[in-house]
Image (cartoon, rainbow, N blue to C red):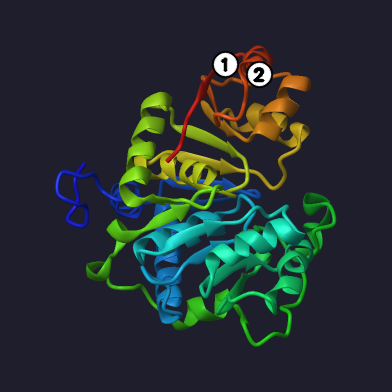
Amino acid sequence: MTHPDAPAGGTAPIAARILETAVARGEQTAISSFGRSWSYAQLTARAGRMTGALARLEVGPDKRLGLLLPPVPTAAMAAMAGLRLGATLVPCDPLARGNGLADRLSGIAAGVLVSLDLTRLQHRWLDLLDDSALDAVLVDKMAELLPFPRNLMAPLLRGGELATLPRHPRTGALPRLLQAEGERPGTLDASASAGVLRADGSRADADQLADAVDRLLDLAGGAGRWLIAQHPEDAWALSALLTPLTAGREVVLLPRLDARTVAAALDQTAPRVAVLSPRVAEALADTPPPSAPLDLAVVPPTVDETLRDRLATAVGARVAVWDGP
């Protein structure tokens, strides 16, 4: 597939592919998470409003966008918005703290960070905010992602309670920005200039991202439903999250990534492809799920052959290594 924003002889950037797919898929489910489903129309509409909100903060080719987010729909929406604006995305490990998180925030430089109003997440970045060069931190409401009231979510999040927005001159509520800003004109799409910061600090550009997406789709074949069981914490993980959306597939995201939750999702949602972090792969290998109708489990190169063999036996599926972008 080619696209006007792609370099000569290149393929369409990821965000452009998702937008084109959404036109064809419309009300088909794009993401299922927390007991709520988002259609392709809903996903791209909110991502479009987010694009406008981030554009007001001058996110673009000259400003980076940090994503300190667990595997929730906001991660896909914010990534789509940042890619459309031509920004370099900096996924941050939502479990990181201290020097590890400080180093990753330094990679965002004078950019914008998107996070959630979960107390545990806020405690990770709030203490580092005064020492960072960040222009702004936008906080999305967890309640916006849920189909039920806040007071029913405690068992789901295991203590990751919601918090009030911290009072700081560089923090702002993302929902308010979304209400104030409409879709950003598609003619200004800068996807071909976008990229994602890898774990080693190098940058994967738009062509490398598109090539990685093609390779992962080739591995998965025509599988219609994907389970994403990893945090979007680096270029590998974020690209894996976005890949099925470029081909009109359904993505299942989980509130937790412990073996029991992943096993239940394998049984209840019956995905054909599961993208697993090393930690989840090891947990499933140690505690085989009773039912896992998988065709394929995708893991990063850091998962060694012994663990891959154990995982294949545990889930009864082919295990493939994807190098990512």
Residue at the image point whose x is 19% and y is 45% from the top: 2
- Residue 26 in the image, given as x and y percentages of width and height: 35, 51
Residue named by callout 2: 311
- Reply above or below: 274 against 196: above
Is 140 positioned to the left or the right of 96 in the image?
left
Callout 2 amino acid:
Leu
Is 177 positioned to the left or the right of 21 in the image?
right
Name the one closer to the observer, 299 or 177: 299
- Reply above or below: 20 against 163: above
Q: CA distance from mark 1 to mark 2?
A: 8 Å
- Reply above or below: 319 against 226: above
Residue at the image point whose x is 73% and y is 62% from the top: 121
Residue named by callout 1: 317
- Residue 285 in the image, given as x and y percentages of width and height: 72, 21
Q: Quadrant of the C terminus?
A: top left
Q: Is residue 221 visible?
A: no
- Residue 171 in the image, given as x and y percentages of width and height: 63, 80
Q: Which marked residue is nearer to the observer: mark 1 or mark 2?
A: 2
Dividing the picture into quadrants, the one containing residue 85 is bottom left
Is 107 positioned to the left or the right of 5 in the image?
right
Q: Earlier in the sequence, mark 1 or mark 2?
A: 2
